[in-house]
Amino acid sequence: MKEAEEADRLAREASIKAGLEAESAKSAHKQSVGRRGKGEAVYRERLAANGLTKEDYQSHKMWIPTIDADTETVDDYSRKLDLARADKDKAEEAIAGNERPVLAPLEASLQEAENAQKGETDNRRKSRPG
């Protein structure tokens, strides 16, 4: 009889402990569902604030790890672009007020002179005895 009473007491204690653990698990589950709901609401708000849909986010999510490297690349490009623009501005200042020559007449004159030289060279070769 004493063994049965002891077994009954142990079973009752185990049942009470299991009941408390079940209640604790239910409470933890309820809290996690609440936190999940809040997290999803924040997620949706952030997507909306950035003009994204869930599908947009999922399709672009793979690029998240490269954001820092991409930002560095863009910043480097921007610095180089700024330097190039500054060089261009300096060059424009250096030539400001200078007239740009009209090249067509100069090129025509050069071609004419080259043709004349070629003609004279050909005449000289023809006039050589030989």
Image (spheres, rainbow, N blue to C red):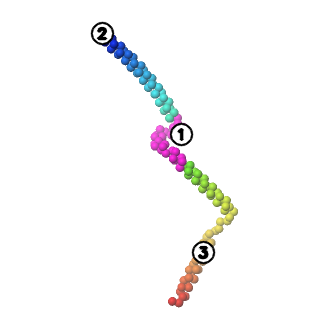
Please tell me whether mark 1 sits on a helix, a strand or a loop: loop
The local crowd at label 1, few if under 14, some if 14 to 19, many if 20 or more residues have their Cα within 10 Å, is few
Quarter that holds the N terminus: top left
Q: Amino acid at mark 3?
A: Leu
Residue 88 colored in magenta in the image: no
112 on left or right of 29: right
Relative to 119, residue 19 above or below: above
| Quarter occupied by residue 14 | top left
Residue placed under numbered mark 1 in the picture: 50
Q: Could you say where residue 61 lies in the image, as x and y percent from the top left?
A: 47, 42
Residue at horizontal 58 percent and vertical 80 percent from the top = 117
| Quarter occupied by residue 116 | bottom right
Q: Amino acid at mark 1?
A: Asn
Please tell me whether mark 3 sits on a helix, a strand or a loop: helix
Question: Which secondary structure is most common in the magenta stretch?
Answer: helix
**Between 75 and 3, which is closer to the camera in this rendering?**
3
Residue at horizontal 51 percent and vertical 47 percent from the top = 69
Q: Which of the two discs, 3 and 2, sits closer to the camera?
A: 2
Please tell me whether mark 2 sits on a helix, a strand or a loop: loop
Residue 60 seen from this side: no
Residue at horizontal 39 percent and vertical 17 percent from the top = 16
Residue at horizontal 56 percent and vertical 51 percent from the top = 76
Name the mark on residue 1.
2
Residues at discs 1 and 3 in contact (Cβ within 8 Å): no
Name the mark on residue 110.
3
